[in-house]
């Protein structure tokens, strides 16, 4: 059975100054993921955030590439594995 997950993912700078992914937050829909990502990007401890969705079958572990809904500030799309 195929499901779509919507996620807001903040980004922070590590000790070396590199942009790295923070803790993802699952959201009920794409609009909420974009709003949460915008809120996360405004947090001074984060340097940016991205909202994305991913569709697939969790039982099989088979997922399509992530679809970026919106991004804010400094982000690393490669953190999505795409």
Image (cartoon, rainbow, N blue to C red):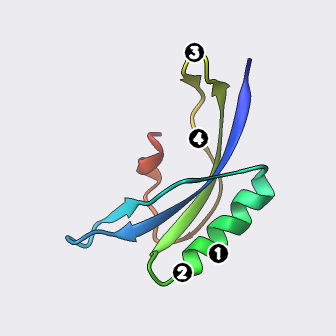
The mark closer to the camera, 2 or 4, is 2
Distance of mark 3 from mark 1, alpha carbons?
Answer: 33 Å
Mark 1 touches mark 2? (CB < 8 Å): yes
Residue at x 71% of width, y 62% of height? 34
Q: Residues within 10 Å of mark 3 (few under 14, many from 20)?
A: few
Sooner in the amino-acid sequence: mark 2 or mark 3: 2
Sooner in the amino-acid sequence: mark 2 or mark 4: 2
Sooner in the amino-acid sequence: mark 3 or mark 1: 1
Distance of mark 2 from mark 4, alpha carbons?
Answer: 24 Å
Sooner in the amino-acid sequence: mark 4 or mark 1: 1
Distance of mark 2 from mark 3, alpha carbons?
Answer: 36 Å
Q: Residues within 10 Å of mark 4 (few under 14, many from 20)?
A: some
Distance of mark 4 from mark 1, alpha carbons?
Answer: 21 Å
Distance of mark 4 from mark 3, alpha carbons?
Answer: 17 Å
The tag on residue 43 is 2
Residue at x 70% of width, y 58% of height? 33
Q: Secondary structure at mark 3?
A: loop
Q: Residue furthest left?
A: 16
Residue at x 72% of width, y 35% of height? 4
The mark closer to the camera, 4 or 1, is 1
Q: According to the image, label 4 marks what residue?
A: 66
Q: According to the image, label 1 marks what residue?
A: 39
When the figure is inspected, residue 12 is found, relative to residue 59, above or below; the finding is below
Residue at x 61% of width, y 17% of height? 59
Q: According to the image, label 3 marks what residue?
A: 60
Mark 2 touches mark 3? (CB < 8 Å): no
């Amino acid at each position: 059975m195929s499901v779509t997950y919507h996620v807001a993912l903040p980004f922070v700078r590590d000790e070396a100054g590199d942009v790295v992914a923070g803790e993802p937050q699952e959201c009920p829909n794409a609009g909420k993921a974009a709003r949460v990502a915008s809120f996360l990007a405004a947090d001074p401890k984060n340097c940016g955030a991205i909202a994305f969705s991913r569709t697939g079958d969790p039982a099989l572990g088979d997922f399509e590439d992530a679809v970026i809904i919106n991004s804010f500030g400094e982000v690393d799309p490669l953190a999505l594995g795409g």
